[in-house]
Amino acid sequence: MCNKIPFALVITGAYGAPAAVRVLQELIRQGERVDVMISAPGQIVLGMETSLNLPGRSAQIQRALSAHCGAAEDQLRVFGRQEWTAPLASGSRAPRAMVVCPCSMGALSAIACGSSNNL
């Protein structure tokens, strides 16, 4: 792995899910660690726009995405919306960089205002 500090990839319900898959594939190809969060609408759009029909639980999604992208063990982690103990939820465990792709207007607004009701 290039760096022990992971990138964060957030996938929301906006259209453009193939771009998120491409970002994830490229980060994995480059040997980076990636922490992924997918909103429920994001999961639906992924299924509509790509061949990825992801299961419901974080651990199952993690296995499916790892297999799809060819990730090494522990290279990709998926966190659910209510996993408040995730490293990303702590200001002292900031990711190396964060990509929100695709980004819905609701997510953009929440990020800009510093408002949240989930991970």
Image (spheres, helix red, strand yellow):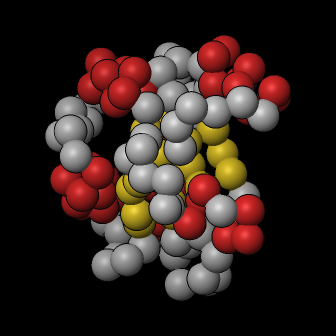
- Up-down relation of residue 57 to residue 25 (above or below): above
- Residue 25 falls in image quadrant: bottom left
The residue depicted at 73 percent of the width and 70 percent of the height is 92
Q: Is residue 87 visible?
A: yes
Along the viewing direction, whichever of 55 and 32 lies nearer the viewer: 55
- Residue 117 falls in image quadrant: top right
The residue depicted at 41 percent of the width and 66 percent of the height is 76
Report x, y in % for residue 74: 37, 77
Report x, y in % for residue 78: 39, 56
Q: How many labels does the image show?
A: 0
Along the viewing direction, whichever of 97 and 30 lies nearer the viewer: 97
Left/right placement of residue 88 relative to residue 68 reads right
Q: Is residue 18 visible?
A: no
- Up-down relation of residue 40 to residue 4 (above or below): above
Report x, y in % for residue 40: 36, 27
- Up-down relation of residue 70 to residue 105 (above or below): below
Report x, y in % for residue 48: 30, 18
- Up-down relation of residue 10 to residue 97 (above or below): above
- Residue 115 falls in image quadrant: top right
The residue depicted at 53 percent of the width and 44 percent of the height is 119
Q: Which residue lies furthest to the right in this view?
A: 112
The residue depicted at 67 percent of the width and 70 percent of the height is 93
